[in-house]
Amino acid sequence: MKEYLLVIDQGTTSSRVVLYNKKFKIIDIVQKEFNQYFPNEGWVEHDALEIWNDIKNLIKKIIKKNKLLSKNIISIGIANQRETTVVWNKKTGIPIYNAIVWQDRRTGLYCSNLRKKGLQKKIQKITGLELDPYFSATKIKWIFDNVKIAKNNLKNNNLLFGTIDTWLLWNLTEGKSHLTDITNASRTMIFDSKKEEWSNEMLKIFGISKKILPKVVENSYNFGSTKLFGMPITIGGMAGDQQSATIGQACFNKGQSKSTYGTGCFLLMNIGNKFKISNNRLLTTVAFKINGKKMFCYEGSIFVAGSAIQWLRDNLNFFKDSNETDKLYDKANDDENIYFIPALTGLGAPYWNSNARGTFFGLTRKTSKEDIIKATLDSLSYQTYELIECMEKDSKIKINEIKVDGGMVKNNNFLQSLSNITQIKIIRPKNIETTSLGAAYLAGLQSGIIKNTNQINSLWEKDKVSKAKISKNKSKLNIKNWKTIIGAVNKFY
Ligand code: ADP
């Protein structure tokens, strides 16, 4: 009998279901984009029911397409967009408001007010996070403050909260499992990551009732089973997308780092089993907890990465296909020195300035579209450098190499730019679909087809290693220029 693992990779703009064989090779992927709602400036919402229906249909589709029966599936893993907040009625299964997406900034003013009250330090000490609309806490509060039926329903014990992992699991198990995993919990800003429990202090600050919260468990766990596709299938693995990619890249040891370059960029560094807060505005989150072993990581996020390439393609019409940027990079003028600050939707770590906007610097009469493309790809290398610098300062560990993944790393010139500017080794694995791979490993661990994380280490395969081709001095000079410019942009906004 053929046996497979099925992974739900629920992202910000599309949902995917990926079929893996027992050797963790991808057999098939089905995907669907879904609607994005922007009801106000800075607001971003999803229809949680649409997401669930898409996932259910994608699972049915991949099972049918590959002529499988539910008994051929060993286990299901879930990797998901993090922080996005759903509150639903457990009797009807209907959300009381659209899912408020991690990108949503509607609680910005509320966060600034809390900051003025001096709460940032306390929040960081308990949750490891920045006081920012990015995380779930203020989104939950907004729903309870603004949705008329919320308070009454809460009184009647009708409501549940979940991030997308919890929402999907609850639907898969037809309301039986209301659980989340520790990595998703650590992004809500109401979870005490050190003590591993919902924080009463945070719940009080945000006025959130404990009774709507899911139970928090390890990443590899028997989360329940689904009977929606025939015989019951266990859900055995769950992690937030970036932590799932960290597992997919086998960053199990202190000091190992991975960086994902998709729509946004997320650099995570494993800092070991002790919770440590950052002095350089990085986030501390749980990397994973597997078989009782918990590891933490520092995380730095860059809000605009691949989306800057999309902007060059769709708004400036510089090329039709993002893959062309690799060849176009080679045609940039050697003597042009253009810098681009791609703050199209603000600046992430370490600036956390959501008002900042994009800026070009150093344009001349000769500047070509290729120079702009090069400046855009290089801008991600400079931002990666700045995150590495913060991580090294905070952790006192030297980063010598980074494992990379995500849509942008198909671009070899980008890999070269990364290693030139950071002056470290940039390593691309054979499978750059590391987000789904991590969840497949977690489900594999739970079902027993892999025994431990050492085995995952031996499954990880490298594809390409990029090393710096420019001198340290040249890269230092460029970084100095970059810092002057980004510093000025940050100050201006
Ligand atoms: P996500 O999972 O966030 O949707 P992906 O990992 O699928 O993102 O990556 C898609 C992003 O990668 C897009 O924003 C696209 O602009 C960018 N991209 C895709 N191919 C290339 C390429 N060859 N060079 C640079 N960027 C690319």
Image (cartoon, rainbow, N blue to C red):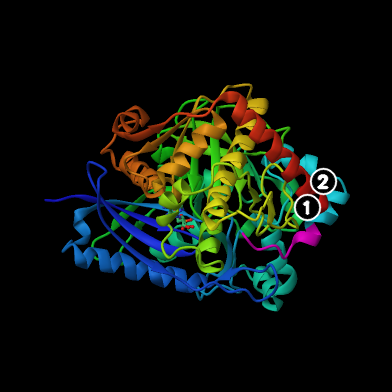
Q: Residue at x 45, y 62 (%)?
A: 168
* 341 vs 18, nearest the viewer: 341
Q: Quadrant of residue 174?
A: bottom left
Q: Amino acid at mark 1?
A: Ile
Q: Residue furthest front?
A: 365
Disc number for residue 119:
2
Asked if the residue at tag 1 contacts the one at tag 2, i.e. Cβ–Cβ closer than 8 Å, the answer is yes
Q: Which residue is mark 1?
A: 205
Q: Quadrant of residue 336?
A: top right
Q: Amino acid at mark 2?
A: Leu
* 434 vs 234, nearest the viewer: 434
* 183 vs 374, nearest the viewer: 374
Within 10 Å of disc 2 (Cα), the crowding (few <14, some 14-19, many 20+) is: some
- x and y percent of residue 166 in the render? 49, 57
Residue 173 visible to the viewer = no
Does the segment drawn in magenta span residue 105?
yes
Which of pointers 2 and 1 lies earlier in the amino acid sequence?
2
Q: Tag 1, which secondary structure?
A: helix
Is residue 479 left or right of 27 when viewed as pictured? right
Q: Residue at x 65, y 63 (%)?
A: 104
- Span colored in magenta: 103-110
Q: Residue at x 52, y 25 (%)?
A: 255
Is residue 454 left or right of 33 when viewed as pictured? left
Cα distance between the residues tagged 2 and 1: 9 Å
Q: Tag 2, which secondary structure?
A: loop
